Image (tube, rainbow, N blue to C red):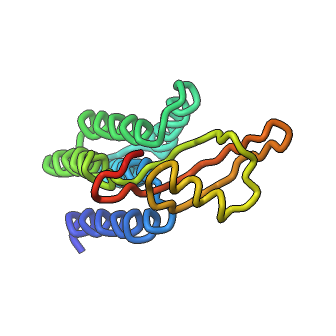
Amino acid sequence: MSQYELVLFDLAAILVLTFGIYFRRHQRRDMVVAFVGMNVGIMSICRVLTSVDASVGIGIGLFGVLSIIRLRSDELDQREVAYYFAALALGLLGGTRVTEPNTSLLLSAAIVLALWASDHPMLLSQYRIQHLTLDHAWLSEADLRAHLADLTQGDIRRVAVKRVDLVNDTTQVEVRYRIPSNGGAA
């Protein structure tokens, strides 16, 4: 299998994993761009590191940089982390001497295309996630789901109760839902 076929295989695999498996089960739109961006970035870096005379320390150092970005930054969401990593990968690809000149171009284009496609506003735009504090202590999940469906005007996909306060009569919840195609209010 040629290196280009391996790149295409990796792209197909991450798309199946992200859209065919993960998103169908968890409906987290923010993780789509993170998974696809990270995969393409890491694959690109690995392709470069295996084609040049580089030490393992460079690869470990790159993951250290990513950890520093994540730990020292203000509340980054998964999408922003993917963009940071993509920027890091593009910098490495642009700054590393590669035996085949087209490899860096192909991999850089793959990173940009992957982030463009996976973070496109039209992609999965009907899916939402909200963290809510409700002014009632909901103990029945069925009643809570019905209330959330009415409140969001959406198709409730997942509800995670974070806290029920019976003294103050509140419920903190994370709700994942899909708004209808006809553009229901959310």
Seen as rendered, the residue at the extreme bottom is 1
Whether residue 50 appears in this view of the structure is no
- Residue found at x 66% / y 61%: 143
57 and 94: which is toward the camera = 94
Left or right for 77, reference 160? left
- Residue found at x 39% / y 50%: 42
- Residue found at x 25% / y 50%: 122
**Which x, y percent locates residue 63?**
50, 41
Q: Quadrant of the C terminus?
A: top left
Whether residue 184 appears in this view of the structure is yes
**Which x, y percent locates residue 44?**
31, 50
- Residue found at x 38% / y 71%: 20
Seen as rendered, the residue at the extreme left is 102
**Which x, y percent locates residue 158?**
56, 60
- The answer to which quarter of the image holds residue 147 is bottom right
Left or right for 7, reference 129? left
- The answer to which quarter of the image holds residue 88 is top left
- The answer to which quarter of the image holds residue 140 is bottom right
Q: Quadrant of the N terminus?
A: bottom left
In the image, residue 36 above or below residue 104: below
In the image, residue 9 above or below residue 27: below
**Which x, y percent locates residue 89?**
34, 40
142 and 60: which is toward the camera = 142
Left or right for 145, reference 127? right
